[in-house]
Image (cartoon, rainbow, N blue to C red):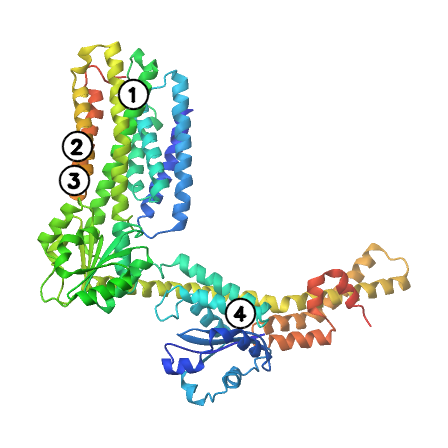
């Protein structure tokens, strides 16, 4: 059944992608009206799929790579929805939805995936660790997308060329970018602390001598640098986008480390 | 019922003519009341704005003379104005009204005020009892068409004046302008207009700078800002989010180094320079700084031109919508006028048929089912054949101007009271249409 729900969610997100792309053109009330129900339905089915998987397997934390991706996709969508309800712009959806869609794809079409096979997965600490870290990832993605949009809008205004598509105001994009960093950072920090506590208790100090851990710390440092540069110097535009790209790459490599880390990895199916 | 419309607008008549024909708002009600007292006019309304005067009337049999009404009401000889007046009938009048309400006929195509003005004029006409069912059918359609045009085309979406383009650009940068701070440098009609537009969107004027102290103080009082001398600008301008410049200075007042300084002090928060001066007050180099946006008068004008072209394209789409709506309205009107008469005509004949069949059946005694059916079929056949021509005539007449005449003749020939029947149902119709 989780497979079915995932596929239903996938279809709704697909509709979301189409409408988010359409809304780049003319402002159309109909699009705005259809986008919300489509994405909300998608998120609802997605949640059911995640919950059912967790119940079937008796673990709260995602066990396989596919499940992890699915959960990350879900949190990204939730994050987008939260920001959308505040700032009323569907623009980031044009990039965020395709990402969520791609992340959900593998779990919706089943197939065997590499898994974590640690008994630790049954502990609540791990669930907390994963959820918090993923929230941090989702926030980072949204901030990254927003800083790219900022560049586009800045270009548009500077070039003085007649408008080709509709964009949210520059300061709104900037605020989305900054706010999502601000919200994501504590999640990321607490998530890392939770992970460290679990590792210390169950594995011991040798756990920390690993590429995954080092990359995580790099990611955290970039996150902090991003926040600080904005807060102290008001960096935005090109500089901020550059830094955000760096942060995004750091996040990607940290994620990828699940495949080559010694201690924190998915094992082959 | 026939629709008539007579009027002048900004395209057909100069202001001198329009003001002679204009009817002040306070007297519109009285004028509309007078309009429906004019011979032949059943319902009517009058729209009078600075760009147009339109008299719309529903008349019986197309005999009403709206020119005569205007002449009598204004007590003016209309002959000198003849060349400026336009007159529309029926479908042409409907089209004109739809175009006016949808702002296709406006001086600035797509401007939103006109719809409100039409609504107001209609409300006034209703208040004094000048507008009834006919006007309601027409005007409610006109409002629906205007709404369709507004939602389905982007006709009113883009700004088409320098000042409103400036506001729109500011909104593209800052989002809401509420609480945004504006610095006005130099005086000038255009820059003050832009400032007023910004204030209307919620921005505040904090500084007004000028070469002379007196002029600065005078303007600062008007805009509730602080007066500055040009030299003081460099220390203060960074507090403003939006700077409007229009001085007569021969060289740029704001150069790249000032921009860098401002950005540093503002911690890179964006700044928008609207440069209306020629020669320019803001060095175009400033636009290259991240976070500073400079638009000079040519930039603004090119956005205006682009938007105007946009509107024209949208106006063509709007015109299509209107044509389509005119057809729908005409179809609806046709049936609205003749349907009640057709229905009561059929009911009337059916009552006669029933009565006659009942009467004859008493004489014939018991009939076989086949005979019953034969009588039914024969009587129905006669009724249908007799009614065929009048109904066809009614339907054809509906498409022509003399519909009301035909309807009235048929009502009188058959002694129908169409309205009573259609409104109060079958029992009345039976009572009314008893054969004499």
Is B385 on the left-hand or right-hand side of A173? right
Which chain is home to disc 4? B
Labels 1 and 2 in the same subunit: yes
Residue positioned 29% across, 41% down in the render: A92
What residue sits right under mark 4 in the picture? B124
- Label 1, label 3: how far apart the Cα atoms are: 32 Å
Which chain is home to disc 3? A
Within 10 Å of disc 4 (Cα), the crowding (few <14, some 14-19, many 20+) is many
Residue positioned 45% across, 68% down in the render: B117
Q: Position of residue B433 (x, y in %)?
A: 77, 68
* Mark 4–mark 1 CB contact (< 8 Å): no
Residue A87 sits above or below residue B232 on the image: above
Labels 2 and 4 in the same subunit: no
Q: Position of residue A225 (x, y in %)?
A: 17, 32
Q: Secondary structure at mark 3?
A: helix
Kindly indicate the quadrant of the structure image that contains residue A244: top left
Question: Which circle marks residue A129 in the picture?
Answer: 1
What residue sits right under mark 2 in the picture? A225
Q: In front here: A101 or B65?
A: B65
In front: mark 1 or mark 2? 2
Q: Secondary structure at mark 1?
A: helix
Q: In front here: B372 or B360?
A: B360
In front: mark 4 or mark 1? 4
The quadrant of the rendering that contains the C terminus of chain B is bottom right
What residue sits right under mark 3 in the picture? A233
The quadrant of the rendering that contains the N terminus of chain B is bottom right
């Amino acid at each position: 059944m989780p497979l079915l729900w995932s596929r239903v969610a996938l279809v709704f997100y697909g509709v979301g992608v189409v409408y988010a792309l359409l809304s780049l053109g003319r402002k159309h009330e109909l699009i705005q009206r259809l986008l919300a129900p489509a994405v909300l339905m998608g998120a609802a089915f997605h949640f059911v799929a995640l919950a059912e998987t967790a119940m079937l397997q008796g673990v709260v934390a995602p066990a396989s790579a596919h499940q992890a991706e699915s959960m990350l996709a879900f949190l990204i969508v939730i994050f987008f929805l939260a920001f959308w309800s505040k700032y009323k712009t569907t623009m980031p959806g044009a990039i965020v939805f395709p990402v969520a869609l791609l992340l959900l794809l593998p779990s919706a079409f089943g197939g065997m995936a590499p898994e974590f096979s640690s008994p630790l997965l049954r502990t609540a600490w791990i669930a907390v660790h994963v959820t918090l870290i993923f929230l941090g990832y989702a926030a980072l993605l949204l901030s990254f997308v927003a800083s790219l949009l900022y560049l586009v809008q800045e270009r548009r205004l500077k070039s003085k060329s007649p408008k080709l598509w509709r964009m949210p105001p520059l300061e709104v994009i900037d605020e989305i970018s900054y706010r999502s960093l601000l919200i994501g950072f504590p999640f990321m920090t607490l998530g890392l602390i939770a992970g460290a506590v679990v590792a210390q208790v169950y594995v011991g100090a040798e756990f920390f001598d690993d590429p995954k851990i080092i990359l995580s710390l790099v990611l955290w440092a970039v996150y902090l640098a991003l926040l600080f540069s904005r807060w102290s110097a008001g960096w935005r535009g090109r500089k901020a986008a550059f830094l955000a790209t760096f942060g995004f790459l750091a996040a990607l490599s940290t994620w990828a480390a699940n495949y080559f880390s010694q201690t924190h990895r998915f094992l082959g199916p | 019922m026939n629709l008539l419309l007579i009027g002048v607008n900004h395209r057909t008549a100069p202001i001198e003519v329009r003001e002679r024909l204009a009817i002040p708002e306070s007297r519109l009600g009285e004028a509309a009341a007078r309009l429906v007292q004019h011979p032949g006019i059943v319902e009517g309304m009058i729209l009078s704005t600075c760009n147009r005067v339109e008299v719309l009337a529903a008349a019986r049999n197309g005999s009403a003379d709206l020119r005569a009404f205007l002449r009598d009401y204004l007590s003016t000889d209309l002959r000198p104005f003849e060349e400026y007046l336009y007159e529309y009938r029926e479908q042409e009048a409907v089209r004109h009204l739809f175009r006016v309400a949808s702002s296709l006929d406006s001086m600035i195509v797509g401007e939103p005020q006109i719809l409100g003005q039409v609504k107001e004029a209609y409300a006034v006409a209703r208040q004094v009892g000048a507008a009834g069912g006919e006007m309601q059918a027409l005007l409610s359609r006109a409002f629906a068409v205007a709404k369709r045009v507004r939602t389905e085309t982007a006709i009113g979406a883009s700004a088409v004046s320098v000042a409103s383009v400036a506001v729109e650009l500011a909104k593209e940068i800052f989002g809401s302008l509420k609480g945004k701070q504006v610095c006005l440098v130099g005086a000038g009609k255009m820059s003050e207009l832009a400032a007023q537009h910004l204030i209307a969107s919620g921005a505040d004027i904090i500084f007004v700078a000028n070469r002379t102290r007196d002029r600065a103080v005078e303007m600062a009082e008007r805009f509730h800002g602080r007066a500055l001398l040009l030299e003081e600008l460099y220390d203060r301008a960074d507090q403003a989010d939006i700077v409007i410049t229009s001085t007569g200075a021969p060289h740029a007042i704001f150069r790249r180094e000032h921009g860098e300084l401002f950005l540093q002090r503002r911690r890179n928060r964006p700044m928008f320079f609207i440069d209306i001066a020629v020669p320019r007050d803001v060095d175009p180099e400033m636009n290259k700084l991240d976070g500073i946006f400079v638009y000079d008068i040519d930039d603004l004008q090119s956005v205006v031109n682009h938007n105007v072209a946009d509107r024209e394209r949208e106006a063509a789409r709007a015109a299509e919508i209107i044509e389509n709506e005119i057809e729908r309205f005409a179809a609806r009107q046709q049936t609205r006028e003749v349907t009640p008469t057709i229905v009561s005509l059929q009911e009337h004949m059916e009552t006669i048929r029933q009565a006659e069949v009942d009467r004859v059946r008493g004489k014939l005694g018991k009939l076989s089912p086949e005979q019953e059916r034969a009588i039914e079929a024969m009587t129905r056949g006669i009724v249908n054949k007799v009614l065929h021509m009048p109904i066809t005539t009614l339907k054809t007449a509906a498409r022509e101007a003399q519909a009301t005449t035909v309807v009235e003749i048929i009502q009188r020939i058959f002694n129908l009271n169409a309205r009573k029947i259609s409104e109060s149902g079958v029992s009345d119709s039976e009572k009314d249409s008893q054969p004499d």
